[in-house]
């Protein structure tokens, strides 16, 4: 009796190949689902300003003056803004160095791609008229800012650093 002929067009793959393809398809669907879930969570957090505030806080944050002694730290006391604040930190430092030396330190910093710190004689958020340096940067829907005030207190110099971020502009 002659052998039955098998058409090459209708030839089915073997069982292991079918299981491998099914497993690959399931993994691809899972990967697409997880990517979609991740992008959805990222969209929601961007709408709420979460990643922008962290990026902005890092980008704008001025360094601390070396060998200055931390006198006081406060959160959220002076940051009464029309838009809700994401973060607000106040740092009060004291050092024996004169005001001009402290200003020269901050103005001489190499901050990479960030703008240089420049002091002006003007009204700050605290202490009236003093040497004030401030800058703000926007990261998508969040604005991150800092203000540095340098003023003499007796024989010492006080360095006040305010960092704050807010939603919107």
Image (cartoon, rainbow, N blue to C red):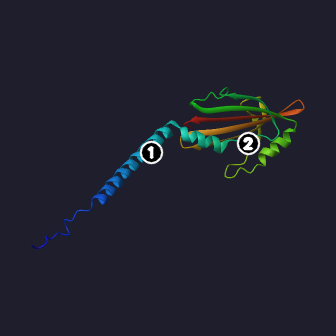
The spot of residue 29 in percent (x, y) is 36, 49
Q: Which residue is drawn at 68% across and 38% down?
A: 146
Residue most toward the right? Answer: 155
The spot of residue 67 in percent (x, y) is 83, 39
Question: Could you tell whether 102 is left or right of 78 in the image?
Answer: right
Q: Residue 39 carries which label?
A: 1
Q: Distance between the residues labelled 1 and 2?
A: 34 Å
| Element type at mark 1 | helix
In which quadrant of the rendered image does the N terminus lie?
bottom left
- Mark count: 2
The spot of residue 164 in percent (x, y) is 64, 35
Q: Nearer the viewer, residue 147 or 74?
A: 74
Instruction: Give the crowd class for mark 1: few <14, some 14-19, many >=20 residues within 10 Å.
Output: few
Question: Could you tell whether 62 is left or right of 21 in the image?
Answer: right
Q: Which residue is drawn at 11% across and 73% down?
A: 2
Q: Which of 15 and 107 is in front in this view?
A: 15
Q: Which mark is residue 63?
A: 2
Question: Could you tell whether 63 is left or right of 144 in the image?
Answer: right
């Amino acid at each position: 009796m002659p052998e039955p002929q098998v058409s090459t067009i209708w030839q089915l793959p073997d069982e292991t190949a079918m299981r491998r393809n099914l497993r690959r398809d399931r993994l691809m669907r899972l990967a697409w689902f997880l990517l979609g879930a991740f992008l959805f969570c990222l969209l929601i957090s961007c709408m709420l300003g979460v990643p922008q505030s962290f990026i902005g806080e890092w980008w704008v944050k001025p360094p601390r003056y070396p060998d200055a002694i931390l006198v006081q730290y406060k959160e959220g006391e002076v940051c009464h803004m029309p838009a809700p604040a994401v973060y607000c930190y106040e740092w009060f430092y004291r050092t024996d160095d004169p005001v001009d030396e402290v200003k020269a330190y901050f103005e001489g910093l190499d901050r990479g791609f960030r703008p240089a710190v420049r002091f002006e004689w003007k009204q700050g958020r605290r202490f009236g008229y003093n040497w004030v340096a401030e800058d703000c940067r926007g990261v998508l829907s969040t604005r991150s800012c800092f203000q540095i005030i340098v003023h003499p207190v007796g024989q010492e110099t006080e360095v006040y650093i305010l960092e704050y971020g807010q939603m919107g502009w």
